[in-house]
Image (cartoon, rainbow, N blue to C red):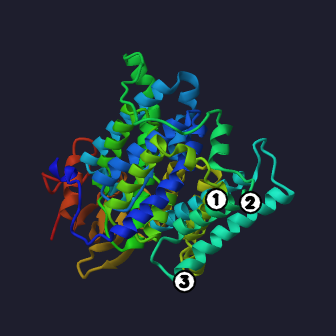
Amino acid sequence: MTKYLNLFDFSQKVDYKTEILSGLTVALALIPEAVAFAMIAGLSPLTGLYAAFVMGFVTSVLGGRPGMISGATGAVAVVLVVLAKTHGVEYIFATVILAGIIQMAAGFMKLGKLMRLVPHPVIFGFVNGLAIIIGTSQLAQFQDGSGNWLTGTPLLIFGGLVLLTMLIIWGLPKLTKAVPSSLVAILTIWGIVAALNIDTTTVRDIVLRSGEDGIAGSFPPFHIPDIIWSWDTLVLILPYAGIMAAVGLIESLLTLNIIDEITETRGRGNKEAVAQGIANVCSGFFSGMGGCAMIGQSLINVSAGARARLSGIFASLMLLVFIMFGASLIEQMPMAALTGLMIMVAIGTFEWASFRTVNKMPKSDIFVMVLVTLVTAILHNLAVAVIVGVIIAALVFAWDNAKRIRARKRTDENGVKYYEIYGPLFFGSVSVFNSKFDVLNDPDEVVIDFAESRVVDMSAIEALNKITERYQKQGKTVHLKHLSQDCRRLLANADKIIDVNVLEDPKYKLVTDV
């Protein structure tokens, strides 16, 4: 337990200026995102902002990936929207707490290692789809409060400010990296709008569209969910909590892997899972909607040079300061600056290298990558996209391996025929395996050699049973040779279920000459 409570990692040198400035940039970018995601779930903006503070602070302190930012996310909001409409915010708080407990259990059981099963084409597709989501979600900022597209002067003003933001973010690092270009871009656009009194969309306009008066609030109040504590309630919220826990862990651990690649360091997935769970439990008790890792804000953070926990801690604390003391000022921030920032994040997130690998990757990998990209972009459900990608990749792998099983045949001077098997024997290769044998025309003694093969599953055991049974009916003897120890254990465990009809060996019912 103590290894999960190691609050700070002092093993690397911390650039305090970079961490603080990057954290400030992230804090400014978190506000409209948290408000928007709360609106998606049908909750008040403060519910999203409180979640962003609690999630960001707890995971920055306890998490397994310094530099990664967590907060209220769209993936979680989509899961909770139906429950929020039917049962209200109190049941949301209870669901978030239960989801956090599930995530903690997953971390303690070290289920983070399951991310090893996610192939690289799936990660490529996930990242590309996410970049499309981040980019296309900014299109809503080019609409007015009635949902109509901006035209004429308002469009020129907003579009010009967005382009200027993008230009600063792109060009400033070529001149100096003393300060994060994203922060400079936000402050520059903010200053221009304020100095020239330009009429353009601000954070306050977004908040007013949600039906709230503003984002001003207090420290997140501790609150035990006011629900009916019963078995029926548990049955109601458990499916939502399970989906939220899974979505949150998948998005967080994939974001962790992406940040690992960018920073060329290695995070700790199981520790991050526990931290995400603790953060969600705290969020539920402190009036938040819960959340998970945010790839957009995480990329803003690491792109600015942040590599330690300080940036995330400072970002969450500044977010709280804005809520408690600076709401009126933050509400004046122009959305054009944040829109330009997020568009640049989308451009930076997209794996442009995936285009260069199209002619070099197997067609099956290209298919998986494109499929995950489309599912992510169309459904806006990252967990479903990743699960679909893993399933398709696994089926492709099984299909490819099913075709690789081979049998080299030879007959020795004593008239014994040998079948030397190559490739794994499992459910996908059983049919091809059975077709390799000529039971009727084979001699009276046959050896099936598994030196270059493995018996993998119950379907393979059944195949061995059937082939020995066919030879036995013809009065012929079969020896199974060079089975590995795990294969022997598998056959022994199946002994009470399947009768492998070779009786020479009383323990395994087969001959295991080595």
Q: Earlier in the sequence, mark 3 or mark 1?
A: 3
Q: Check the picture and name the quadrant holding the C terminus.
A: bottom left
Q: Nearer the viewer, residue 55 or 29?
A: 29
Mark 2 lies on residue: 158
Q: Which residue is depicted at the point 21% across and 59% down?
A: 486
Above or below, comparing residue 140 to residue 47 in the picture: below
Crowd tier of the residue under label 1, counting other residues whose Cα lies within 10 Å: few below 14, some 14–19, many 20 or above: many
Q: Amino acid at mark 1?
A: Thr
Check contact, mark 2 vs mark 1: CB within 8 A: yes
Q: Amino acid at mark 3?
A: Lys
Which is closer to the viewer, label 2 or label 1?
Answer: 2
Above or below, comparing residue 192 to residue 53 in the picture: below
Residue 348, position in %: x, y?
A: 56, 70
Could you say which disc has been placed on residue 339 in the image?
1
Question: Distance between the Cα atoms at labels 2 and 1?
Answer: 10 Å
Check contact, mark 3 vs mark 1: CB within 8 A: no
Query: In terms of secondary structure, where does tag 3 sit?
Result: helix
